[in-house]
């Protein structure tokens, strides 16, 4: 199998599905001739033409609104929002319209689109190019939310997302767009939505993460191992619906849990995960569930490596939780 | 539609000094970026300097200005010190936003510069808000808001114009149309390339010109500012311009041909201003003197930025809310 990075794997999935299904179209800012600001749609314009790979003006509300209309007419649009920080002009379209079509049509008529968007920190983008807004969408009933951590999952999850009957927000961690590499099957396959993966097997403490921070958790786990603490690392892959079975199984095994995410702590997904663990595995807990997250502040330009929950911030919490 | 303004040698030299300062500032910023001293994004204004300098020179010090993420030139033209600007790029606590904003997010209340904005078009309705407040309080402050042609397809642009026309606000909407919405030319994003025509739908005054000199910018914008200040009526001004660098430092700009770029550089209004001062007015000595002074100012700014400390982590929360509270 060929080696790919995240960008190549996502590009491969888009190409494969556009060849397979003529209903699939891409639209967004600079996605066509330019091939995307991160080059994710490179080459698709040349292969599929400008009626399937559509350059749009800077108009996020228009992009998502138009994509919803296309979906209602039977197409399968995969719009790109250039940075997830730019999604807020389209928030009304996503929250008020996209998430509610199935409901308002009595379960008959979903607006099936997959919104791809780069997420998270790691490129010193400051407060408008670094945020992680996943919990704002998880909070909205009717949407599914996916965030892969490696190229093979990125391709399989994107193909699953495009074929899934519900609208999906597909967050692509930009910090590892090119840094995460791995073998990727050239053929057609899917990775199921709603299924987590055990990235590292361990028995003392469970750490739950996704996207770019998975690698920081693995690094912290290796450092903890040197101090005699055996860490299990769970890669959520799908943020909603959560694989609560996998989470509970791991917590029952270790009795201790740390959740790591880039987004601010307050009302972040970590809070919901901890609440669910309390509800479902309270009597198995040996220590208070802990969170290592971004701060409750805007995303800073200069202090990025302090703000992000990198290994140096994760390790002390892992040890503390393990030894509680 | 222009206003005739006095034009002395002293003024011409000062306008050239400001344009040259912005250009040299950004050339040094680009160098520092290449050396890894500046992180994130760096969008250079090189080629568009006559607009910032011309506009600022016909604004009152208390007139509000809001602009895009391509904001260094506007901030310097309004009076931000090169030290504070360069330190912000370097992410230092001595920067205009304590190093927490960076290149795209300059802010300088002292000089009525209410920010560079990283969300395209997001600031346009905010500018309508400052203009509304000025009128509501019976003051004659004018707001100038700058944006690129890419912003004219964003809903916020239309919402801002709509309110400004409806409420007859003292505001000037200035579209710096540099022909490329990041990497995509106007022809691929706009059905009508005359941006000023968008004013017609709102019954708003409009103006449009291809920038050739800072004096021309001054004359056109003075007219629009006067309309805002005395009649409290908005104007949409489209200034056709061109940036000589990529969208940002990470953009090689391959969507433009070398011929196109060279052709536009021949019309560089900053170099033409210099040539006019040196060749036509015989002010070579004065020009070279001010250029030497600018070199010192820029070198000082770089040195200051390099030597300044980074902000402490406690600033993050301290700058987010007015006080601390337990969580």
Image: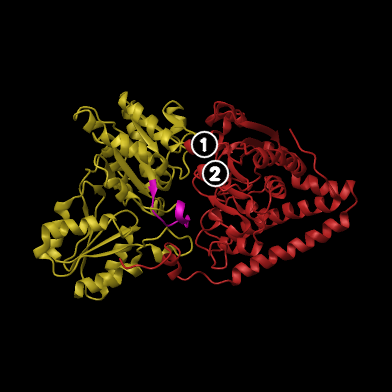
Chain colours: A yellow, B red
Q: Chain of mark 1?
A: B
| Chain where mark 2 sits | B
Find disc 1 in the rendering and name its residue. Answer: B163
Q: Which residues are magenta?
A: A118-128
Which residue is drawn at the image coordinates 19% and 62% (left, top)?
Answer: A201
Give residue B19's position: percent from left, percent from top.
Answer: 72, 52
B132, A260: nearer the viewer: B132
Against A113, residue A301 (above or below) is below
Residue at 86% x, 58% y: name it.
B286
Counting residues from the start of the chain, the first of labels 2 and 1 encountered is 2
Choose top left, top right, bottom left or bottom right for residue A265.
bottom left
Q: Given contact means CB atoms under 8 Å apart, are the residues at marks 2 and 1 in contact?
A: yes
Q: Residue furthest front?
A: B138
Instruction: For label 1, count other residues whose C-alpha is less than 10 Å away and answer few (under 14), some (14-19) or many (20+).
Output: some
User: From the image, which quarter does the N terminus of chain B lie in?
Assistant: top right
Residue that mark 2 sits on: B132
Is residue A249 visible in this depiction of the protein? no
User: Quick one: SS at disc 2?
Assistant: helix
Foreground: B285 or B166?
B166
Q: Magenta span has B294?
A: no
**Residue B14 visible in the picture:** yes
SS category of the residue bearing label 1 = helix
Point out the image quarter for the C terminus of chain B: bottom left
Foreground mark, 2 or 1? 2
């Amino acid at each position: 199998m060929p080696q790919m990075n995240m960008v190549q794997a996502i590009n491969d999935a888009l190409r494969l599905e556009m060849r397979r299904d003529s209903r699939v179209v891409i639209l967004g800012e600079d996605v066509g001739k330019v091939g995307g600001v991160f080059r994710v749609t490179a080459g698709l314009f040349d292969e599929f033409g400008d009626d399937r790979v559509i350059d749009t003006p800077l108009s996020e509300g228009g992009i998502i609104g138009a994509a919803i209309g296309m979906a209602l007419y039977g197409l399968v649009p995969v719009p790109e929002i250039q940075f997830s920080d730019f999604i807020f002009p389209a928030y009304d379209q996503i929250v008020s319209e996209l998430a509610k079509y199935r409901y308002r049509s009595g379960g008959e008529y979903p607006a099936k689109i997959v919104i791809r968007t780069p997420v998270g920190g790691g490129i010193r983008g400051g407060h408008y190019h670094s945020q992680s807004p996943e919990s704002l969408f998880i909070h909205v009933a009717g949407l599914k939310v996916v965030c892969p951590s490696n190229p093979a999952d990125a391709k399989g999850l994107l193909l699953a997302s495009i074929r899934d009957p519900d609208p999906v927000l597909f967050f692509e961690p930009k910090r590892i767009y090119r840094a995460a590499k791995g073998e990727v099957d050239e053929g057609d396959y899917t990775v199921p939505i709603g299924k987590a993966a055990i990235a590292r097997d361990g028995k003392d403490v469970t750490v739950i993460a996704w996207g770019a921070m998975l690698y920081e958790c693995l690094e912290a786990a290796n450092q903890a191992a040197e101090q005699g603490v055996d860490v299990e690392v769970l890669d959520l892959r799908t943020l909603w619906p959560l694989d609560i079975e996998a989470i509970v199984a791991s917590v029952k095994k270790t009795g201790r849990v740390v959740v790591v995410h880039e987004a601010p702590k307050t009302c972040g997904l970590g809070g919901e995960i901890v609440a669910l663990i309390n509800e479902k595995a309270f009597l198995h807990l040996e220590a208070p569930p802990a969170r290592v997250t971004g701060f409750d502040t805007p995303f800073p330009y200069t202090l990025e490596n302090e703000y992000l929950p990198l290994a140096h911030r994760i390790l002390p919490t892992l040890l503390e939780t393990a030894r509680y | 539609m222009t206003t005739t303004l006095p034009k002395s040698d002293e003024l011409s030299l000062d306008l050239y000094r400001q344009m040259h300062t912005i250009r040299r500032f950004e050339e040094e910023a680009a160098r520092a970026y290449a050396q890894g001293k500046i992180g994130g994004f760096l969008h250079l204004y090189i080629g568009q300097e006559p607009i910032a300098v011309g506009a600022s020179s016909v604004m009152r010090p208390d007139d509000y200005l809001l602009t895009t993420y391509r904001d260094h030139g506007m901030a310097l033209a309004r009076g931000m010190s090169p030290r504070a600007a360069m330190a912000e790029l370097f992410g230092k606590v001595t920067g205009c936003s304590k190093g927490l904003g960076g290149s795209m997010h300059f802010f300088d209340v002292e000089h009525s510069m209410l920010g560079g904005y990283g969300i395209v078009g997001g600031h346009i309705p905010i500018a309508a808000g400052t203009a509304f407040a000025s009128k509501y309080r019976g003051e004659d402050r004018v707001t100038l808001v700058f944006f690129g042609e890419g912003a004219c397809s964003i809903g916020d642009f239309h919402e801002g114009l709509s309110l400004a026309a409806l409420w007859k606000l003292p505001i000037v909407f200035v579209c710096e149309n540099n022909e490329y919405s990041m990497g995509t030319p106007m022809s691929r994003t706009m059905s009508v390339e005359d941006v000023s025509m968008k004013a017609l739908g709102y019954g708003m005054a409009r103006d449009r010109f291809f920038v050739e000199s800072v004096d021309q910018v001054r004359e056109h914008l003075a007219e629009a500012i006067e309309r805002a200040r005395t009649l409290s009526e908005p104007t949409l001004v489209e200034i056709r311009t061109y940036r000589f660098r990529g969208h940002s430092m990470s953009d090689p700009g391959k969507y433009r041909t070398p011929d196109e770029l060279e052709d536009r550089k021949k019309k560089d209004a900053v170099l033409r201003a210099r040539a006019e001062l040196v060749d036509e007015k015989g002010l070579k000595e004065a020009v070279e003197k001010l250029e030497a002074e600018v070199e010192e100012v820029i070198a000082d700014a770089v040195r200051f930025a390099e030597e300044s400390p980074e902000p402490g982590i406690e600033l993050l929360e301290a700058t987010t809310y007015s006080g601390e509270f337990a969580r």
